[in-house]
Image (cartoon, rainbow, N blue to C red):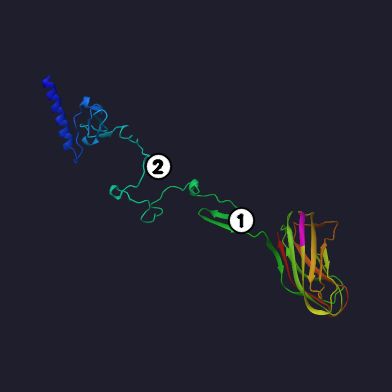
Amino acid sequence: MKSKILLTFSAAVFFCAMLFYSMDRAPIALAQQGQQFELACPIGTNPLADHITLDQATGLYRAWGCIDLRTGKITLQPDAAAGAIPSLPIDLTASVSGLLPAANGGTGANTLAGLIALPSDVSGLLPIANGGTGTNAPGLVSGPNVTITGTWPNQTVAAASASAAVCTNSTPVTVTDSTVATLLQTCSIPANTLAAGSLLSVELVGVNGTGSAETITLNLGLSGDTQCNTGSGVTAVSNFQPWHARALLAVLTAGASGTANESCEYASTANGGGVKGPSTAVGAPTFAVNTTIVNTFDVTETMSGANATNTVTEQILKVLAF
């Protein structure tokens, strides 16, 4: 009996001496006494001196770091009392907190000291969820009045106005003492420019001078036909009275037998005839238009009275298509 007690005491003294010797030194493997451990290393491995904890409640040891003396392989085993060992791979979001110190290969800060260099420091594609496109060849899509030409990354995006200038005539034309319809300015509308739903906005600017009271009638239409006429009020004896006329021509149906409607108006000073209109189309209530051919927008003028000093000058004619 005394021999057993002496043997047990000697083993305990040896274990404590080895445990003390291992402090602040490289990891040392200890012999494992099964009856002294409540969490022992697997068979074939030995506990590491600096990976042992003492359970104060039971007085027994818990080995959570073990070494295989044949291969030198060290394994960690979960210890509920000391905290679970995370399994690999480690989830950086859920299982790691804080900052990696510089001494351990980190920066010790949550910001980079320098700028990230593209493309040497970045690879892959930025996902849509993070504000990217998720692809290295995004499919740009054109829209109303927007065109896209070329291939990525050499694509050209062009925007067009909702309206386009169809024709302009800026050569002034003056008519003197004319009581019959006399041509002022014209401009040509290319074939197939007009489609169902097209709207032509026609703007005219000019001046007039009268030696006697009269009225002025402007006849506005396509290809020599008068689709709309707008008259002025009675003019007074004066010179160089500015006037402005406008017509809106709406294409209802297109083709060789298309149809359209038109409204027009005239505005000037009181001496130049005042404001007149809007006047409606000459039709019942539409007129025919062939959109497949070149159409000419004509402006003619008629004076109500003969006087050698009566003049009407058209300075500019512009047609816009919407």
Q: Secondary structure at mark 1?
A: strand
- In this view, the residue in front, 214 or 191, is 214
Q: Toward which corner of the image does residue 266 lie, by quadrant?
A: bottom right
What residue sits 57% from the left and 55% below the top? 149
- In this view, the residue in front, 137 or 240, is 240
**Against 154, is 270 above or below?**
below
* Mark 2, other Cα within 10 Å: few <14 / some 14–19 / many ≥20: few
> Which residue in the protein does label 2 denote?
93
- In this view, the residue in front, 68 or 291, is 68
Amino acid bearing label 2: Thr
What residue sits 30% from the left and 50% below the top? 102
Amino acid bearing label 1: Val
Gap in angstroms between the C-alphas marked 1 and 2: 45 Å
Q: Residue furthest top?
A: 1
Where in the figure is residue 145, as x and y percent of width and height? 63, 56
Q: Residue furthest right?
A: 305
> Which residue in the protein does label 1 denote?
146
Report if residue 169 lies within the magenta region.
no
The span shown in magenta is 248-252
